[in-house]
Image (cartoon, grey):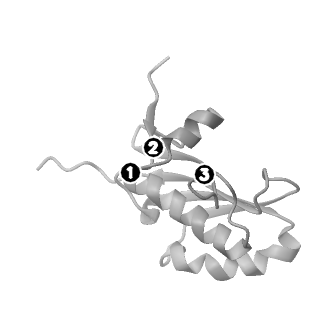
Amino acid sequence: MNQRDVVFPPGRQALYEINRYSPAIRSNGFLFVSGQVGSREDGSPEPELEAQVRTAFTNLNAILHAAGGSFDDVVDVTVFMVDPQATFERIWKVVPEFWGNAPYPTITAVGVTWLYGFQFEIKVIAKLPEASND
């Protein structure tokens, strides 16, 4: 098996080691990002839903930046929401702060019953920019 090219955001490596997963893997020009939630630095959830969504995007953007990309490079998004009937509109009011302009990435939204104490999770695949030869 090939060695995995793991991308860690600054200051959060210990959380990923405790939970035994990689935040993101770079492979063949793509970045596969594990689901990101609205966790504080200690791993606890932001108590308020909108703050959770903003923190999840902030955590996601830290990983994208560490890999040399941004949300503009995202091609596919999967979001998980606890009780989407009650939370979707509140979540979708926050999303445009981070989503950027059209054309938008593809998206799959999934309603779930449990997210380890969180209400929102976002997982993405990004096509990383080509490295320059300057």
* Residue at figure coordinates x 88%, y 56% from the top left: 113
* Disc 1 secondary structure class: helix
Q: Is disc 3 placed on a helix, strand or loop?
A: loop
Closer to the chain start, of discs 1 and 2, is 2
| Foreground tag (3 vs 1) | 3
Residue picked out by circle 3: 42
What residue is drawn where x is 48% and y is 76%? 100
Q: Nearer the viewer, mark 2 or mark 3?
A: 3
Instruction: Report, in whole angstroms, how far the alpha carbon at label 1 lies from the one at label 2.
Output: 7 Å
Amino acid type of disc 2?
Phe
Amino acid type, mark 1: Ala
Q: Is residue 47 above or below residue 5?
A: below
Label 2: state its secondary structure: loop
| 1 and 2 marks in contact (CB < 8 Å) | yes
Look at mark 1 in the image and give the residue it sits on. Answer: 66
Q: Nearer the viewer, residue 33 or 52?
A: 52
Task: Please give left or right for residue 50 compared with residue 84 in the image.
Answer: left
Query: Label 2 vs label 3: CA separation?
Result: 16 Å
Residue occupying image coordinates x 56% and y 65%: 57
Residue beneath disc 2: 8
The answer to which quarter of the image holds residue 18 is: top right
Answer whether labels 2 and 3 touch (C-beta < 8 Å): no
2 or 3: tag closer to the N-terminus: 2
Q: Is residue 97 left or right of residue 108?
A: left
Using a 10 Å C-alpha cutoff, classify the residue at mark 2 as few (fewer than 14 neighbours), some (14 to 19) or many (20 or more). Answer: many
